[in-house]
Image (cartoon, rainbow, N blue to C red):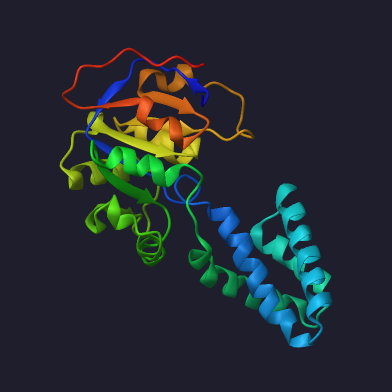
């Protein structure tokens, strides 16, 4: 069974609000797939298909290594382009980066277990999305992944200019738009700083989908009973209960 950290009793919820990139959508994997295609379009002009594919994979490996060392995305792309041994590498890097951003939503797929979790919850809660992605990208993902099956278009909230998670005024505005008291809203996300802290400080509940490489420090003392922690989104149905129902006993970890 999926490991679950118990941070207080299961609390009543009316709205479950999801982050998009990294929580519902495998966004980093989508970018790497988009980057591979963007480099392929550039290198494909050279004619030798076999050599081009090998070079692209080597360049992508350099990109991943750069990112794992803490370099920015643009720096990682420059490292990848250097492997391609092209002239005007800075201009090429900008071109490839722009193309990869354009292609990224087309490469998007659900995080494992996310689609089934949405299906389980959709009949019991009002589902919404709150993302720092721009509105156009959020809409494209909503269409591409057929999220209309679970989330109304009007319940997709892209952060407006000048206001992004973890700003409390954004969470409060979303709760008001949903017509739901903050205490009955749950934010589900993979970023402790952006998704969890802003939500809890705004009176929401939160479920942190904690990755294996997240900081081992416990946030219990800071956020208390409003926070639940799991290592997979598939644990979510066991961590919350619909508002108005009596809380069942907590599930066991094993």
Residue at position x 74%, y 67% from top? 78
Q: Is residue 156 left or right of residue 37?
A: left
Residue at position x 23%, y 36% from top? 124
Pinpoint residue 147: horizontal percent, then vertical percent. Answer: 34, 55
Q: Quadrant of residue 66?
A: bottom right
Q: Is 9 rendered above or below residue 159?
A: above
Q: Quadrant of residue 145?
A: bottom left
Q: Is residue 66 left or right of residue 11?
A: right
Q: Is 9 rendered above or below residue 55?
A: above
Does any portion of residue 205 appear in the rendered image?
A: yes
Residue at position x 81%, y 70% from top? 55
Q: Is 205 rendered above or below residue 82?
A: above
Pinpoint residue 28: horizontal percent, then vertical percent. Answer: 58, 54
Does any portion of residue 91 appear in the rendered image?
A: no
Residue at position x 24%, y 46% from top? 173
Pinpoint residue 242: horizontal percent, then vertical percent. Answer: 23, 28
The residue closer to the viewer here, 219 or 145, is: 145
Number of numbered markers: 0
The residue closer to the viewer here, 245 or 1, is: 1
Q: Quadrant of residue 196?
A: top left
Q: Is 180 rendered above or below residue 49?
A: above
Pinpoint residue 223: horizontal percent, then vertical percent. Answer: 41, 22
Q: Is residue 58 left or right of residue 132?
A: right
């Amino acid at each position: 069974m999926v490991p679950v950290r118990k941070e207080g009793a299961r609390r009543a919820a009316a709205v479950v609000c999801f982050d998009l990139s990294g929580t519902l959508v495998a966004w980093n994997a989508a970018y790497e797939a988009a980057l591979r295609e963007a480099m392929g379009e550039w290198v494909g002009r050279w004619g030798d298909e076999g050599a081009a594919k090998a070079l692209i994979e080597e360049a992508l490996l350099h990109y991943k290594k750069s990112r794992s060392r803490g370099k920015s995305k643009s720096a990682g792309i420059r490292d990848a382009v250097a492997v391609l041994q092209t002239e005007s590498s800075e201009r090429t890097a900008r071109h490839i980066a722009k193309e990869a951003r354009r292609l990224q939503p087309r490469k998007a797929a659900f995080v494992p277990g996310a689609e089934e979790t949405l299906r389980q919850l959709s009949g019991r809660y009002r589902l919404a999305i709150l993302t720092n992605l721009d509105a156009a990208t959020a809409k494209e993902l909503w269409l591409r992944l057929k999220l209309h099956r679970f989330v109304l278009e009007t319940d997709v909230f892209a952060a407006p200019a000048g206001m992004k998670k973890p700003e409390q005024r954004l969470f409060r505005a979303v709760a008001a738009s949903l017509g739901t008291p903050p205490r009955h809203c749950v934010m589900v996300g993979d970023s402790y700083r952006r998704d969890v802290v802003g939500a809890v400080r705004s009176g929401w509940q939160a479920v942190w989908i904690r990755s294996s490489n997240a900081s081992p420090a416990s946030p219990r003392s800071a956020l208390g009973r409003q926070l639940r922690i799991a290592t997979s989104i598939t644990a979510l149905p066991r961590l919350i209960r619909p508002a108005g129902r009596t809380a069942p006993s907590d599930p066991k970890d094993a």
